[in-house]
Image: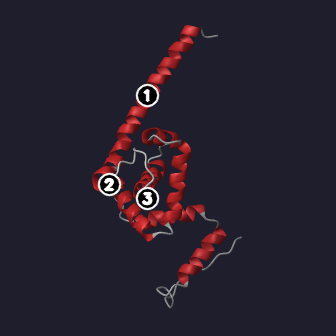
Amino acid sequence: MKSFIELERQRVANSIIELERQRVANSILSQYSKILLDDTGIDITQKGRKRDKVDLTRIFCKYVRYNLGFSSTRIATFLNKTHASILHAANTYDHLYFRELNFRELADFYITRFAAIDGVEMEEPNHSDLMTLISCASEKTKGIWLKLIQDTEMLRGIATNIELVENE
């Protein structure tokens, strides 16, 4: 059984390690928030509920959570928010991305900028977005999407050798 002094030493060591992890996380996250601040003059780490700020926060949260793998708690600490706010921002990103053209254009612009920081070329951003959607869909949904694509004006009349598979 560990003594009180050993337990206290371990607790202090863990606290120091956690503080260093958060310092490194803040250093990384500040690179992305600084781009938003420089471009728009909006500081996403400050409180506020204006639509422009909220949209930029959604884009930031979605990118750093899903592309960089930061936890919602780490992001929340950086932005002075709760982890639930981060999850909500990332989830509402998807809703707006597929329904609002202005938001989609803004998101695509900043996601490409953020990817440049990471040294990732977004040569085919639509491809990666489609592959993400496809990976989340059931086979039946994929079949419905394929049928919709094949029935578009642009593809109508073009011979395709793709058969619709209905497994569900």
Q: Position of residue 143 (x, y in %)?
A: 62, 74
- Residue 140, above or below 13: below
* Residue, far right: 168
Residue 134 in sight here: yes
* Residue type (three-letter) at the residue carrying disc 2: Ala
Q: Position of residue 111 (x, y in %)?
A: 39, 58
Residue topped by disc 2: 116
Residue density around tag 3, few if under 14, some if 14–19, many if 20 or more, within 10 Å: few
Residue density around tag 1, few if under 14, some if 14–19, many if 20 or more, within 10 Å: few
As helix, strand or loop, the secondary structure at mark 3 comes to helix
Residue topped by disc 3: 51
Identify the image's colour scheme: rainbow, by chain, secondary structure or one colour.
secondary structure
As helix, strand or loop, the secondary structure at mark 2 comes to helix
Residue topped by disc 1: 19
* Residue type (three-letter) at the residue carrying disc 1: Leu
96 relative to 117 in the view: left or right: right
